[in-house]
Amino acid sequence: MHNLTAITALGSSVPSVDTVDGATLCENAELALASVHARIGHETACRAALADLLDGRVPDVGKVILRDPEAAFWTGPDQWMVGAPYETHEDLDAQLKARFGASASITEQSDAWACFDLQGAKMERVMELLCPINIRAMQTGDVQRTSLHHLGCFVIRRDPSDWVRILGPRASAGSLHHAIVTAMRSIV
Amino acid sequence: MIINHPLLGPRDSAEFVYMGDASLIERPDPEAENAADQFHDYAYLRDNPAGELRELWFHEGGDRSWLVVTRDTRTHEISKVELARDVARSKGRSL
């Protein structure tokens, strides 16, 4: 058995935290992710399995179901991303596959994304510098995919609503982090 | 230019990538007897109308859906936006 040391997306043993007046950015290394894509002809069964997982609800277009331990958001027609605490759901894809069976294609996504939580009174102004979406029109439970620093990212408005979760490509975590921190420091 | 995405509403065209004529989703049957001729036409022949044109746009900076956009090449007016998969399904494919 290899004796490997886990590191965060930014390459450290502890998640980074950056604070400026009015906004805090926390790297989140506690998130397991898996994508769910309904197979052609099995859309109804897939939605039923997803509803079974999420207390009878399925995320509509541009929406998130925020709950514990599993949460999910819409990523495209008949496609969703499911998230859960890494501590208890390291094998999230296998857990979901057991639920969905042949109705959906499940792909492990935990190692594909870097997760940053941005929170504070100036969050909206930081997001306005970073991406073209109308962050002020988004409410708790809304999600949009957009481009931050030329990187395709999901932006989820959470509860409380001064908090957004940004999921970006893990291979570019350093660039994404740099862009967000630069925007935070640019807010006067 | 604004593209009225059928699911997400009005979005800036900068979020999209132009992917060519909408006839590209009508790929010929490779098993057909005249497949070579059909693929020649499919790959090389395009109409170039001064007027309504159906074209493919990919929502790269959004939900990554493929759209069939009907656009007037003289005015850039967009008269119709459909999900490409709905267009294919209306023709009995991708079911």
Image (spheres, coloured by chain):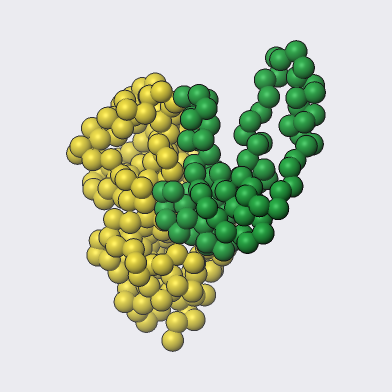
Going by the picture, which residue comes out furthest to the bottom? A188
A41, above or below B88, in the image = above
A37 sits left or right of A179 in the view: left
* Residue A24 percent location from the top left of the image: 37, 71
* Residue B30 percent location from the top left of the image: 71, 19
- Give the colour chain A carries in the figure: yellow
* Residue A112 percent location from the top left of the image: 50, 45
Going by the picture, which residue comes out furthest to the left? A55
Name the image quarter holding residue A28: bottom left
* Chain with colour green in the figure: B
The residue nearer to you, when weighing B65 against B24, is B24
* Residue B28 percent location from the top left of the image: 68, 24
Residue at (43% x, 34% y) in the render: A37
The number of numbered discs placed on residues in the rendered structure image is 0
Residue at (41% x, 76% y) in the render: A125
A99 sits left or right of A110 in the view: left
The residue nearer to you, when weighing B80 against A75, is B80
A131 sits left or right of A19 in the view: right
Residue at (20% x, 37% y) in the render: A56
